[in-house]
Image (tube, helix red, strand yellow):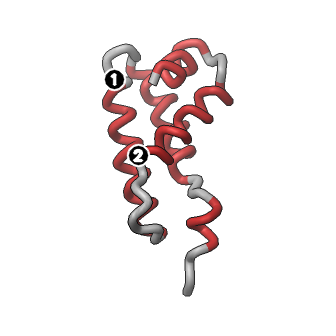
C-alpha cells in the first residue's frame, strides 16, 4: 500500500509500485482453483481491498489515478493461468 500511495502522490516509483501491487494480488489469490474465472475474480477482490486501504491518504484525483493503474495491473493475468484456458 505504501508504494501505491507514494506513486499516486509523487508520480515516482512506478515500477516499484507495479511490482508491489502485483505481488499483493498474487498473494491474495488462493491456489486451490486455477481457473481463469476464479483467478480473475480473486484479483478483482484483492484490488478492491487494496483500494479501500488507500482512500484516506489520497485526494480524489490521486485516488482516480491509482484506481486506473491498479485496474490495469489486475487485468494482467499470470501466464500459467492464461495458458490453462481451454475452449
Vertical comparison of 10 with 84: above or below: above
Cα distance, mark 1 to mark 2?
19 Å
Vertical comparison of 64 with 61: above or below: below
Residue located beneath label 2 in the image: 28
Q: Is residue 35 left or right of residue 81?
A: left
Residue 23 placement: quadrant: top right
Q: Percent position (x, y) of residue 36?
A: 48, 68
Residue 55 is tagged as 1
Question: Regarding mark 2 in the picture, which secondary structure is present there?
Answer: loop
Tell me the residue at 59%/28% (across/down): 17
Tell me the residue at 62%/18% (across/down): 11
> In the displayed image of the protein, which residue is found farthest to the front?
32
Residue 21 is tagged as none
User: Pointer 1 and pointer 2: residues touching (CB < 8 Å)?
Assistant: no
Tell me the residue at 58%/75% (across/down): 84
Question: Regarding mark 1 in the picture, which secondary structure is present there?
Answer: loop
Q: Percent position (x, y) of residue 20?
A: 56, 32
Count of marks overlaid on the render = 2
Amino acid at each position: 500500500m505504501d508504494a501505491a500511495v507514494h506513486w499516486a502522490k509523487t508520480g515516482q516509483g512506478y515500477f516499484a509500485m507495479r511490482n508491489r501491487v502485483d505481488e499483493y494480488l498474487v498473494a491474495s489469490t488462493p491456489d486451490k482453483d486455477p481457473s481463469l474465472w476464479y483467478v480473475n475474480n480473486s484479483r478483482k477482490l484483492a484490488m478492491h481491498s487494496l483500494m479501500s486501504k488507500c482512500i484516506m491518504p489520497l485526494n480524489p484525483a490521486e485516488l482516480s489515478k491509482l484506481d486506473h493503474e491498479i485496474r490495469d495491473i489486475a487485468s494482467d493475468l499470470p501466464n500459467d493461468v492464461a495458458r490453462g484456458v481451454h475452449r
